[in-house]
Image (cartoon, grey):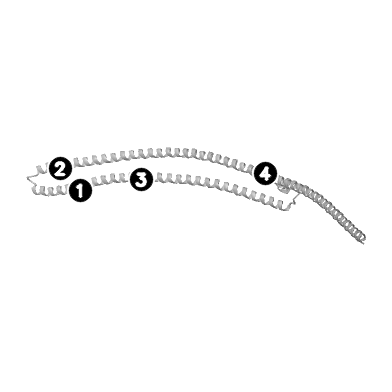
Amino acid sequence: ESFAFRNEEGKRIREVEDQMKANAMQDEHESYELKWAGERDADDYKKQMDQERRDSLNFRNQEAARHDAVMKELHSLAQEREHESYMLKWAGENDAKQYLADQEELRRQSLAFRNAEGRRHRDIDEENRAKSVLDASNNEELNAACQRDVCQYRADCAARDRASLCLRGKEHFSNRMQAENDREVKLQQDHESHLLDTAAWQDVNDYVDECKRRKRLSLAFRAKEKCRHFQIEKEQAKLKIRQQHLDTQYRSEDARYIEMAKLKEKARVALEAFDRSPTTTFGNPFAKILNNSM
């Protein structure tokens, strides 16, 4: 019985050991299966990552090509805008040179006009001086004539007085009453003569004052007219220069607005072409702009 029990126990133990070995082998086999499956998954994952890397490289190459095309187009647009900017700059410099030449020509014309005006004013002043000298000569002749008339009148009065005195001396004794009447008549005549003399001198002085006043008024009027003409010419020159400056400024602003409108239109067309074009390396999204610009 002890051997039988031990045999059964040994058999049972061997069966248990065999079962444990089988289980261990099964576990090892499953472990190998899991290992192989993990290795296959790792290989598949590596293949997937390699494919994704290749796809990523292809996509980045396409994006780099598209970006290069866009940058080339933007660079060409920048060069074109820089060229147009230089053209505008050169045009502005040419306009400035033309404006300076025009201003120089206007300055020469102004100098010629001022020389002609100066010559004309000098001629007018010379004529006025000659006229004033002639007027002074005429005044002197009139004064001399008046003085001669006064002297002649005084001489006539003195001769008449002498004749009257001689006549009264001769008729003194016989015509005393008549002499008295003659004296009164003489006094009256002397008074009238004095009044005439005073009136004559007053007329002469009034005429001289009137001539001087007319001369002063003529000189003042000519000076005022000369100042007014000079002021009018100066204002006209300023208005002409201001008009030319405004014309140049308006032309510059028009050119700048036209340039801004062209750039905005080109940018809008570029954005529309970029939005409509697919992301591919077989087409250029700026082909329409290049064709239009060419």
* Residue occupying the point 40% across, 45% down: 227
Quadrant of the snapshot with the N terminus: bottom right
Instruction: Pick the residue in front: 268 or 291.
Output: 268
Instruction: Choose the circle earlier in sequence order: 1 or 3.
Output: 1
Residue at mark 2: 161
Looking at the picture, does residue 57 appear above or below residue 10?
A: above
Residue mark closest to the camera, 3 vs 2: 3
> Which one is earlier in the sequence, the residue at label 2 or at label 4?
4
Q: Which residue is pictured at 38% across the width and 44% down the height?
A: 223
Q: How far across and down, in percent of the image, does residue 243 sit?
A: 52, 47
**Is 293 left, or right, of 149 in this rendering?**
right
Q: CA distance from mark 4 to mark 1?
A: 110 Å
Which amino acid is tagged 3? Ala
Q: Which residue is mark 4?
A: 75
Residues at circles 2 and 1 in contact by the CB criterion of under 8 Å: no
Tag 3 residue:
220
Depth order, front residue of 4/212: 4
Q: Is residue 233 left or right of residue 259?
A: left
Q: Residue at x 29, y 41 (%)?
A: 139
